[in-house]
Amino acid sequence: MKKILFAGLLFFNIAAFAQQDTSGYVYSLQKFQEKYVATHNVVKGEDTAYLKFFPIDSNYRVTATFEKIKDDTGFIMQLSENKTAKYFKYGKVTFILQNKPVTLFLYQSKRLMKTAQYKNYLFIPFIDLSNGATSYGGGRYLDIDIKDIKGNKLTIDFNKAYNPSCSYTTGYNCPIPPGENTILLSVNAGEKTYAKPMH
């Protein structure tokens, strides 16, 4: 009887500790997702129930080696709806994911870099093998702040990958990830395909 009581108390204490551990990695990602849903700029109201995510997995949080790129010319990135926009290559990152080497480029929008709010904003649009199956067919995005780059290292968390606005409805011009940002793996992290059928 005492052993059973002790086991019950131990379980209760562990559960209570888990609830109090607000600094944990999983908890921080859960709060990130909650905020993402609550402040979504396209999906509102009851439709937010259709926003879905892969299970949080710390294996998709990687430390990448960063290399700055000097790009004074820029390039034209293709957008949906047959539009284009000017971007600059800010740098590239290399890292290991699922035991395979991956290289991605970070871009800076010519339009946004002129604004005070987004002057430090970097953009990683990417394609992976989950697209069209469990994630949006047109690829997903990651946001990076220049200040997140420490020396030549950058932490990238694919659990924060999100869908472009045009994955939810029509009328948006979304950057199409360049082919050079293709990951030949299924990145089962971050936002899944929007579950509500588009009309």
Image (tube, helix red, strand yellow):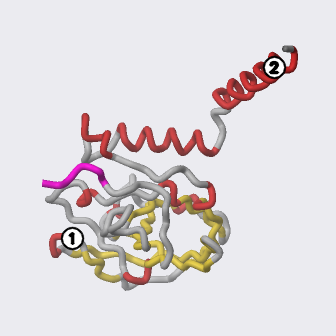
Q: Secondary structure at mark 1?
A: helix
Residue at the farthest front position = 1
Identity of the residue drawn at 63% across and 45% down: 25
What kind of residue is marked 2? Ile
Q: Along the horizontal axis of the image, is 134 left or right of 22?
A: left
Residue 105: x, y in percent?
Answer: 48, 76
Residue 32: x, y in percent?
Answer: 49, 43
Q: Quadrant of residue 47?
A: top left
Residue 196 visible in the snapshot: yes
- Give the extent of the magenta segment: 194-199
Q: Which residue is mark 2?
A: 4
Residue 93: x, y in percent?
Answer: 57, 75
Label 2 Cα crowd, 10 Å radius (few <14 / some 14-19 / many 20+): few
Residue 163: x, y in percent?
Answer: 35, 58
Q: Along the horizontal axis of the image, is 65 left or right of 7?
A: left
Q: Considering depth in this image, is 191 or 42 the residue closer to the camera?
A: 191
Q: Considering depth in this image, is 6 or 27 the residue closer to the camera?
A: 6
Name the chief secondary structure element in magenta.
loop
The CA distance from mark 2 to mark 1 is 62 Å
Q: Along the horizontal axis of the image, is 23 left or right of 108?
A: right
Q: Along the horizontal axis of the image, is 18 left or right of 3?
A: left
Identity of the residue drawn at 74% across and 28% down: 14
What numbered label is drawn on residue 80? 1
What kind of residue is marked 1? Ser
User: Mark 2 vs mark 1: which is more N-terminal?
Assistant: 2
Q: Secondary structure at mark 2?
A: helix
Q: Quadrant of residue 119?
A: bottom left
Q: Is residue 80 above or below residue 4?
A: below
